[in-house]
Amino acid sequence: MNLKVFYHPECALQKCKDILHKLTLGTEYSFNYNLCPDPKSLEAGSLYLDKLDQLVFVGEENQKPIVFSWEKALQFWSRESYSFKKTPLLKALGVKEGDHVVDATCGTGMDSAFLLHAGLQVTAYERFFPTYLLLQYSFLYEKQQKSLSENLPLKIIFGDYATNDDQWECPVFYDPMYDDGSKRKAKTNKEMSLFHKLLKDTEDDSEKAAQLLREKTKRLVIKRAPKGELLLKGPNSQWKSKSVRFDLYI
């Protein structure tokens, strides 16, 4: 499958191509590169290499592009002042520093970054290939730029953990993203609104995916709205904060 990638004339194209080539090895994807000085002329959601060599999703009219940065995500969590050991997610996962966790739906990478900052080893799955590209490209590019540690314990896998043959003994974290279990529709910022539109056709039956995950892991944690409906019946425990709830199944 051939994907169009547009690029700014000032980007280091060959360096960017080298990174992207690594990400297609073993997949059915390849790239067609097209010069485009002005990304405003492109359709929202197009893949674009900007003059800073970042791979981005072009935003909708008058919106900034969607940029994934592991460095910035880790910096965000480092500014938070609360105790990581007391956070509901880590309590639900039942982990200690150095343990391994699977993030079954990486998405924007913010939850994976939180887990990394808490000192965990993370394997993150992303099944929408363009999103996987942005996540993995940022990871490799920022390591090249020395803004990420070469030893950051993160592995990003293209695929659907719920339906593939991978099997992990460690806890699994699942964020349905589009179905938080609440009656009302959650408000999203403009960038996340575009992100949701791009992934709309790839949305799964959250309940079915959760059931598959429960069958293949000994400890599953599902993210929900504080008063959201259960995705699966009979959680063993629940941990809540003002903005989120984590349901534990063991």
Image (cartoon, rainbow, N blue to C red):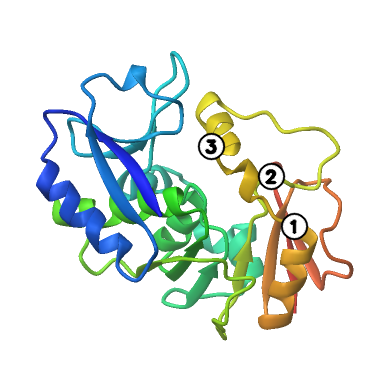
Vertical placement of residue 147 versus 159, above or below: above
Vertical placement of residue 64 versus 104, above or below: above
Residue sitting at the far top: 62
Is residue 147 among the parts visible in the rendering? no
Give the image location of residue 159, x and y in percent.
51, 66
Q: Earlier in the sequence, mark 3 or mark 2?
A: 2
The type of residue carrying mark 2 is Tyr
Q: Which residue lies under the disc numbered 2?
A: 178
Is residue 163 among the parts visible in the rendering? yes
Give the image location of residue 104, x and y in percent.
57, 65
Asked if the residue under mark 3 is in contact with the one under mark 1, i.e. CB atoms within 8 Å, the reply is: no
Say whether residue 228 is left or right of residue 165.
right
The type of residue carrying mark 3 is Phe
Q: Residue at x 46, y 51 (%)?
A: 109
Vertical placement of residue 225 versus 140, above or below: above
Q: Which residue lies under the disc numbered 3?
A: 195
Q: Which mark is residue 206?
A: 1
